[in-house]
Every structure is written in C-alpha cells, then in structure tokens.
Image (cartoon, rainbow, N blue to C red):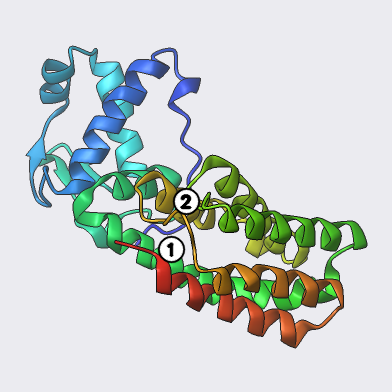
Amino acid sequence: MNSMPLTLDPAESAEGPLLTKVLDELGGEIVSGTMAPGERFTLQDLSSRFGISRTVAREAMRALEQLGLVSSSRRVGIKVLPEEHWAVFDQAVIRWRLSSEAHRAKQIVSLDQLRKAVEPVAAALAATNATKEQAQELKALAEQLMELSEAGQGNTDAFLEADKRFHTLILECSGNEMFSTLTLPILYVLEGRTRYGIMPNDPHLDAMAYHLKVAEAIQSGDSTGAENASWSLLRGVDGFVEF
C-alpha cells in the first residue's frame, strides 16, 4: 500500500489549472466509488471526456498512478485500484475522502485514531523539549479556545485556526521530526470537522479544559501529566463530535 505523502503539484505544469480540474474530478469519482475498482478506461477516453490533449491526459494518469488510485499497462489500459492501494496520507486523497459522504466518517475516524497514536506521545516529549516561548504560546492558545467555546464559537474559523495552531505546536515542540511530518493529516481532521458541520458550536467545556491542562503540564515539564491530559482531551472530543 502506498502510504507516504506525495508532493504532486499540478500547478507546476503548463496545463496546471486544467490538470488540477481533471485530477479533482477523477480522484473524487474514484474515491467516492463512482468509478469502481476494476473499471477501465484509456487516455483517449480522458481526452474525449474532458476535451484535453493526450499530454494532459497522460499527466493526469501518472498523477493518479502515483497516488495508487489507478494502474496502467499497454495491454489493459488504465484500471481503477481498490482502497488498499491508495496513498492514504496524501493530502489530495484525504481531501477527496472527506468530500465523499460515503467515506467522510471513516476518514475522520481514521485520522482521529492517528492522533491518538501520536499526540499523547508528542505532548509527553514536548514537556521536555518545548522552549519557554512555545509553552507560553500553547497556554495562550488553550485559553483562547476556552473563551471561544464559552462564547458558543466552537464551529468558527477563529476557533479552528487556534485549534490547528495548538495541535501543530505540540507536534513541533516534541522535537521529533517524524511527528512533524504528520501535521497535515492531523490538521485535516480538525478542518474536516468544522467544514462539514461535525463540530458543535459549543464544545463541552470539560474537553476544552483539557487543552489548558495539556499546556500547563508541558509548561511545568510534566511529561506524564501532559500525556495523560492529551489522552483525556482526545477522548473528550469523541464525546461531542456529531456525525
């Protein structure tokens, strides 16, 4: 299974905007199941459907192939692949899965499980490795999140941006460069909850209070306390996310 993020940037192509449109439409159809595993098509099919040159069609095919969504050969053409082949950490695949009603809940659950595997350990490491300035910023963000939640603004852009910065900073403070590479997948679950109305306007204040407990434990250098508070925070979020 392809699992590491790719850095596909259709905008770098001379046909960037057109290629992006083709990729988004095809990728979304494959991920949603509109184009089922085993379904086959050709470069000519792509050219005819989208009114694009064979060069652009070939670029689209190669990009989808890199993402594990299709395979290609001269004998069978382009074939749609099942989910186990997808590059599930790639931001495009995550975005397409979140956009699909059939896959959205599963994608958010998968990302939440990833957070549970990483964030508590990152918080424990941050208690040892965070600078004074980083710890102060974490506490300020936690206080901001509490204030926004109390004001019924848990489903706003302001809350989302503060929450994204809080969780990104924990990964950065861990001092583990591998954890930092997981920032984008973890941010996608936060964005997805807000974008698709899964996050309530007034998250439980108990869950919000754990942001502050995580920050305070990191600030005081309490690795065990930071890890436990992070666990409690993530479990608390499970209690109010509304699918």
Figure check: 90 above or below 171 = above
Figure check: 16 above or below 240 = above
Quarter holding the N terminus is bottom left
Q: From mark 2 to mark 1, how far is it between C-alphas?
A: 8 Å
Q: Within 10 angstroms of label 1, few (less than 14), some, or many (20 or more) residues?
A: many
Disc 2 marks which residue? 188
Is 166 placed left or right of 192 in the picture?
Answer: right
Tag count: 2
Disc 1 marks which residue? 111
Quarter holding the C terminus is bottom left
Which image quarter: residue 17? top left
Callout 1 secondary element: helix
- Quick one: which residue is furthest to the front in this view? 151
Which image quarter: residue 128? bottom right
Asked if residue 182 shows in the view, the reply is no
Callout 2 secondary element: helix
Seen at 19% across and 47% down, the residue is 32
Is 49 placed left or right of 15 in the picture?
Answer: left
